Image (cartoon, helix red, strand yellow):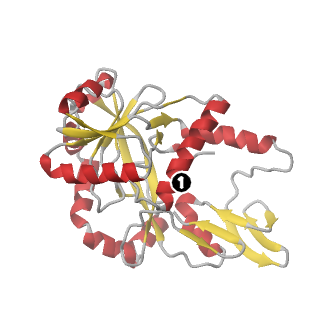
């Protein structure tokens, strides 16, 4: 369980400050954060509301920062704009002239959450948790649906597809045409060594570029006490290609041959080149981190496991920034 996006993320309990008011992400983030806190408390899963700062590094970033603050207010997020003096009280080593302080942001180990949920499901009479089942066919039958996997045939009246990195493929297996294709983006991380961990006390984020659904290279305290730095966002050479040189030819061909990917690449080639440069040049990655914490040096960083994001891209080359739901009377597909 939790082998992909659930177990390969930064473990942040997000507040919902970034999302467009009224969007599915905004609504579900607010509800989900509270539900996750309650679940962790009830089940004895370690978590912490350590707080986050979103740092404006110069005057040009102030208007974007203020728009994020306004979104947070509209979404019911407890947050405040703070000046340099207060910023240094919270994060003594951070750069920035102003910041948004979001005290309700937190951290948790989502792998532990997933494993506990699996235990609770398995403990309930009538439930089965089937792992290692590759879905190969979904078809309608008189009673509902037949799902054929590499190990079994399963009949069901309804189906909810939350296939993550393969959600668009599962949607197609069910006879529906997904409105976007999953393009896998790899997020690469470093971890601060013992000498440098004290430089980050909470979560430190830059003001993101509103053109992209990525939050930029940032610092994240992890529930085990470590501090992660990243991620960048580069095309993964496979939907499960976590290693630096992992490659799945069919996945890569599917991404590169998709017209939506090519249109996206043309629109955002400059951003893409910068992300690739940071991927293969540690010095460039360090310089991105130094914008937030100037004291960071290359010697402070060691490689950490990467994650892969299931980014939905439309045929027009637009990156979908909200949940994309495609459904009929029997199947609900969460396409990203």
Choose top left, top right, bottom left or bottom right for residue 152.
bottom right
Residue 259 placement (x, y as % from top left): 38, 78
Dot 1 alpha-carbon crowd within 10 angstroms: few under 14, some 14 to 19, many 20 or more: some
Number of on-image labels? 1
Residue 84 seen in the figure: yes
Extreme left residue here?
59
Residue 280 placement (x, y as % from top left): 26, 49
Residue in the image at 46% along x and 32% along y: 49
Choose top left, top right, bottom left or bottom right for residue 270.
bottom left
Residue 294 seen in the figure: no
In the rendered image, the vertical position of residue 26 relative to residue 316, given as above or below:
above
Residue 18 placement (x, y as % from top left): 37, 52
Choose top left, top right, bottom left or bottom right for residue 305.
top left
Residue in the image at 24% along x and 31% along y: 87
In the rendered image, the vertical position of residue 272 relative to residue 138, given as above or below:
above
Q: Quadrant of the N terminus?
A: top right
Taking 179 as reference, is 159 left or right? right
Return the residue nearer the eye: 122 or 281: 122
Residue in the image at 49% along x and 45% along y: 8
Identify the secondary structure beneath mark 1. Answer: helix
Taking 304 as reference, is 116 left or right? right
Residue at numbered disc 1: 28
Taking 221 as reference, is 125 left or right? right
Return the residue nearer the eye: 333 or 55: 55
Residue 52 placement (x, y as % from top left): 36, 36
Taking 78 as reference, is 99 left or right? left
Return the residue nearer the eye: 47 or 82: 82
């Amino acid at each position: 369980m939790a082998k992909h996006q659930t177990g390969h993320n930064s473990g942040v309990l997000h507040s919902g400050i970034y999302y467009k008011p009224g969007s599915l992400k905004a609504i579900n983030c607010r509800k989900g954060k509270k539900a996750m806190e309650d679940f962790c408390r009830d089940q004895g899963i370690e978590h912490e509301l350590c707080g986050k700062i979103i740092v404006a590094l110069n005057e040009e970033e102030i208007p974007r920062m203020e728009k994020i603050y306004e979104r947070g207010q509209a979404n019911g997020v407890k947050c405040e704009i703070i000046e340099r003096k207060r910023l240094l009280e919270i994060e003594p080593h951070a750069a920035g002239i102003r910041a948004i302080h979001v005290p309700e942001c937190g951290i948790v180990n989502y792998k532990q959450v997933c494993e506990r949920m699996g235990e609770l499901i398995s403990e309930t009479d009538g439930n089965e948790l089937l792992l290692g089942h590759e879905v190969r066919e979904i078809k309608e039958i008189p009673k509902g649906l037949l799902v054929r996997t590499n190990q079994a045939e399963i009949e069901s009246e309804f189906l909810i597809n939350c296939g993550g990195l393969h959600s668009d493929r599962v949607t197609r297996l069910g006879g529906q045409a997904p409105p976007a294709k999953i393009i896998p983006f790899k997020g690469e991380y470093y971890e601060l060594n013992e000498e440098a961990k004290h430089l980050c006390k909470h979560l430190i984020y830059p003001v993101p570029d509103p053109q992209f659904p990525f939050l930029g290279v940032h610092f994240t305290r992890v529930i085990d006490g470590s501090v992660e730095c990243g991620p960048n966002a580069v095309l993964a050479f496979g939907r499960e290609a976590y290693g630096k040189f992992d490659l799945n030819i069919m996945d890569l061909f599917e991404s590169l041959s998709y017209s939506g990917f090519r249109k996206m690449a043309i629109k955002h080639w400059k951003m893409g080149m910068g992300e690739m440069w940071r991927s293969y040049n540690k010095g460039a990655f360090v310089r991105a981190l130094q914008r937030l914490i100037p004291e960071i040096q290359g010697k402070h960083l060691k490689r950490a496991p990467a994650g892969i994001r299931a980014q939905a891209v439309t045929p027009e080359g637009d990156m979908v920034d909200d949940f994309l739901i495609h459904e009929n009377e029997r199947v609900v597909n969460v396409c990203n």
